[in-house]
Image: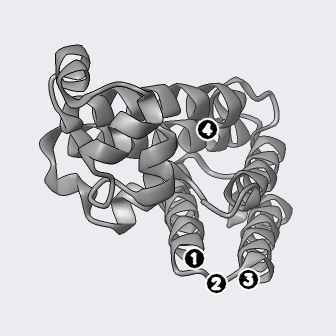
Amino acid sequence: MQQFWRRGYHATTTRDLESSLGINQSSLYNAFGSKSELADAAIERYQARLDERLFQPLIEAEDGFAAVDQFFRKIERWLLEDGRGCLMGRLMGEGAARDPRVADRLSIYRDSLANALSAALTTAAYLGEISRASVGSRTQVLVGAVFGLNMAVQANLGPDAISSMAAATRREVADWRAAGVAA
């Protein structure tokens, strides 16, 4: 996972994987079958971390807007933590989706992200803070914001720009809450 995160899917060679795992090429292929299958396992592990740390709190939130605000605070820290950004953003940005296994994992990620954000906004709608009809479009705005933050990291825009983008997204969400159901 660390190799793919640091170097990307295409730039990570089997030799890189051998070195980081401390095994030879035949052991690598015996254990995982292929680079694609190893990437699949690594991405699955990363997705589990995202689900637990970022997505589950959105799904379980009692206050949808507060959960979305907290999510964007967490994702900002996640992206800036060590300068690598998000593994999924890295893979999407480099076009790793050309590999069918990676494409499937990225699709799961996109669906998980959208479902978690939608769950939090649905909670806000249930509480009467926004209209139910707006949940879908607002979810797409937030998914786009997450993708934009990921690409900002990959484009090396720097911590100030990424923090500014995350703060702008949080302000937009706060405006949705302030405007209420009419918006």
What amino acid is at disc 1? Ala
Label 2 or label 1, whichever comes before in sequence order: 1
What amino acid is at disc 4? Thr
Q: Is residue 62 above or below residue 11?
A: above
Q: Tag on residue 122?
A: 4
Location of mark 3 (residue): 161
Label 1 or label 4, whichever comes before in sequence order: 4
Relative side of 2 to 170, left or right: left
Tell me the distance, in whole angstroms, between the alpha carbons under discs 1 and 4: 28 Å
Tell me the distance, in whole angstroms, between the alpha carbons under discs 2 and 1: 5 Å
Mark 1 or 4: the one toward you: 1
Relative side of 50 to 106, left or right: right
The reply to whether discs 2 and 1 touch (Cβ–Cβ < 8 Å) is yes
The reply to whether discs 3 and 4 touch (Cβ–Cβ < 8 Å) is no
The residue sitting at 15% across, 56% down in the picture is 98
Q: Tag on residue 157?
A: 2
Mark 3 or 2: the one toward you: 2
